[in-house]
Amino acid sequence: MAGAGTPTSGSVALMMVAAGRALSRRVEDVLAPLGLTLRHYGALAHLSHRPDLSYSDLARRAGITTQSMHATVRALEEVGAVTRTLPGHGHAARLEVTEQGRQLLAEAAAAAEQLDLELFSDLTDQERDALRVGLLALVPRPDTR
């Protein structure tokens, strides 16, 4: 809802970049007490829906190198959120979210929901729905291989 002092001109893309950076920091802050980062959360969320994803698939979705994703998954293994099964030479490791990982995802979702309430409580349901639809239109669809 545009109010007094709300900018009505300027690059929407640049405003979204600034908002995205600020929101990333806020989300990192609510995930930190759970021992998670956005990268950890993203990997867990992807794996909870698609345990067949490889390190390369996860890295592509996160926009990071495969080596960085190996470190991310290793950190998730260390806290018991993910298990890695090595099926044999020449086959990709299978990564599975554990019960501990599902619990972390549930706690992270609750923290994100609380943050949403804090950030967007001044919006009407219709405005929140419009924002959600607009943002979803901008999010690239993941490769569905």
Image (cartoon, grey):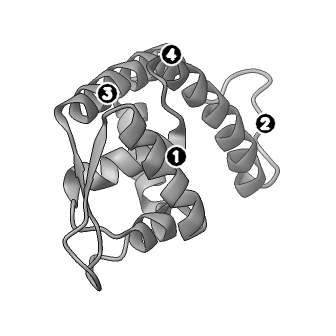
Instruction: From the viewer's perspective, tell me whether residue 25 is left or right of residue 139.
Output: right
Mark 2–mark 4 CB contact (< 8 Å): no
Task: Give the structural element (helix, strand or loop) at label 3.
Answer: helix
Q: Quadrant of residue 80?
A: top left
Q: Which residue is mark 4?
A: 33
Q: CA distance from mark 2 to mark 1?
A: 32 Å
Which residue has dot 2 on it?
Answer: 7
> In the displayed structure, would residue 90 be above or below residue 44?
below
User: For residue 39, which numbered disc appears in the image?
Assistant: 1
The CA distance from mark 3 to mark 1 is: 13 Å
The residue that mark 3 highlights is: 104
Q: Which secondary structure, mark 2? A: loop
Instruction: Give x and y (percent) for residue 48.
Output: 23, 49
Q: CA distance from mark 4 to mark 1?
A: 15 Å
For the residue labelled by badge 4, is the local secondary structure a helix, a strand or a loop?
A: helix
First along the sequence among labels 3 and 1: 1
Residue 108 at x, y percent in the picture: 37, 26
Q: Residue at x 62, y 33 (%)?
A: 23
Nearest to the observer: residue 9 or residue 71: 71
Question: Which residue is located at x 40 percent, y 23 percent?
Answer: 124
The part of the image, by quadrant, that contains residue 28 is top right
Q: What amino acid type should be assigned to the residue bearing mark 3?
A: Leu
Query: Whole-percent x and y of residue 98?
Result: 20, 39
Quadrant for the C terminus in the image: bottom left
Q: Is residue 130 visible?
A: no
Q: Position of residue 63 (x, y in %)?
A: 58, 65
Residue at the limit of the structure toward the bottom, as seen here: 90
Q: Is residue 144 above or below residue 110?
A: below
